[in-house]
Image (cartoon, rainbow, N blue to C red):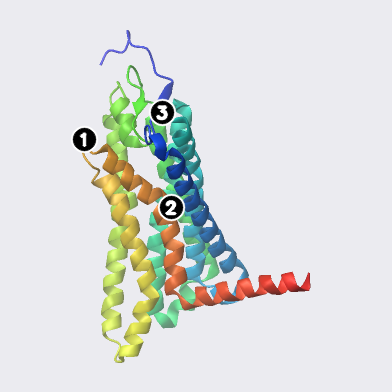
Amino acid sequence: MDNKNQSTITEFLLLGFGDLHNFKILVFNLILLTHVSALIANVLVIVLVGVTPSLHSPMYFFLSQLSFCEIMFTSNIVPTMLWLILEGGGKVSVARCIAQFYFLGVPIMAQCFLLAAMSFDRYVAICRPLHYTTIMTFTHQLLMVTFCWLLGSTLTFCVCIFLSKLIFCNLNTIDHFGCDVAPLLQLSCSSTSSVELVTAMVAFLVILSPFTFILVTYISILRTILQIPSTTGRHKAFSTCSSHLIIVCTYYGTLSSIYMFPPKDNSVNLNKGLSVLYTLVTPLFNPLIYSLRNQEIRSAISKYFQSLRLWKVLL
């Protein structure tokens, strides 16, 4: 397309939730309360894993990394969401929009790989228990976590490089509360084929590849569990995986619905609803699952708050 006579756009107008009329303060407070609750829950998980010796195991180390992903993700998008609610919309520069996408994409992609690392940990623990301590050493845990973060950062950066080459003109309105690939492609007046190809490849690497790996490992885990002779043993083995399975289904379900099977153009409100679920509910949901379904986490929480009360008495 010829862009010579078209002015280049340097700012986008984010519409957010639009005009909420009398519900503005209610929605603002609800989102703020959910966000603060999610932050407290995830920080608590990180603190508990750090200070509780019984939680110094690979599974909880990966769980603390998941919580860090949630904190990084929600802290990036929710303040913008709250600002847009109060203002009824707002302008952001193209550079800031791409930067926001980067800091949203890194924890999203890192979390996909971390969930795969957690499934590998469960596979080794159940299918190869005699080799668990030699395979899941702390050095190996650090290498796996570092790989997850580096891969997430690199892939997101690659997408951002291609996004930064797009030219925007005429239209500059994004009917959403954050910057993402789809609306940027719709607004671009230059060729988007290279960006679409890169994002498709990244989506395959980030979503399908880890999910396939998780599926394969859990098939092996299920086969091993079914070979355990006692019902109690089978139940105990499966209970160590149930929390992770619930998080995997919730996470990949919402992620796929947004990025791999997005709603049609006339379903903007549905897309926003899915994004709110992914942005606010999932970060609060994940630590609650592990807290409610895991006896070690519940015990650590109880001991932690008992120690806090003891310190208050002594002071």
Q: Earlier in the sequence, mark 1 or mark 2?
A: 2
Residue 258: x %, y % from top left: 29, 46
Q: Identify residue type, mark 1.
A: Asn
Q: Quadrant of residue 27?
A: top left
Residue 86: x %, y % from top left: 48, 34
Dot 1 and dot 2 residues touching (CB under 8 Å) = no
Q: Earlier in the sequence, mark 1 or mark 3?
A: 3
Q: Identify residue type, mark 2.
A: Ala
Pointer 3 local density, CA inside 10 Å: few below 14, some 14–19, many at least 20: some
Q: Residue at x 33, y 11 (%)?
A: 6
Q: CA distance from mark 1 to mark 3?
A: 27 Å
Q: Identify residue type, mark 3.
A: Ser
Q: Earlier in the sequence, mark 2 or mark 3?
A: 2
Residue 249: x %, y % from top left: 31, 61
Q: According to the image, label 3 marks what residue? A: 164
Q: According to the image, label 2 marks what residue? A: 110
| 3, above or below 112, in the image | above
Q: According to the image, label 1 marks what residue? A: 266
Q: CA distance from mark 2 to mark 3?
A: 22 Å
| 211, above or below 133, in the image | above
Which residue is outermost to the bottom? 230
Pointer 2 local density, CA inside 10 Å: few below 14, some 14–19, many at least 20: many
Q: Residue at x 47, y 30 (%)?
A: 87
| 259, above or below 312, in the image | above
Residue 53 in view (yes/no):
yes
Residue 238: x %, y % from top left: 34, 78
Secondary structure at badge 3 equals: helix
User: Mark 1 or mark 3: which is in front?
Assistant: 1
Residue 127 in view (yes/no):
no
Dot 2 and dot 3 residues touching (CB under 8 Å) = no
Secondary structure at badge 2 equals: helix
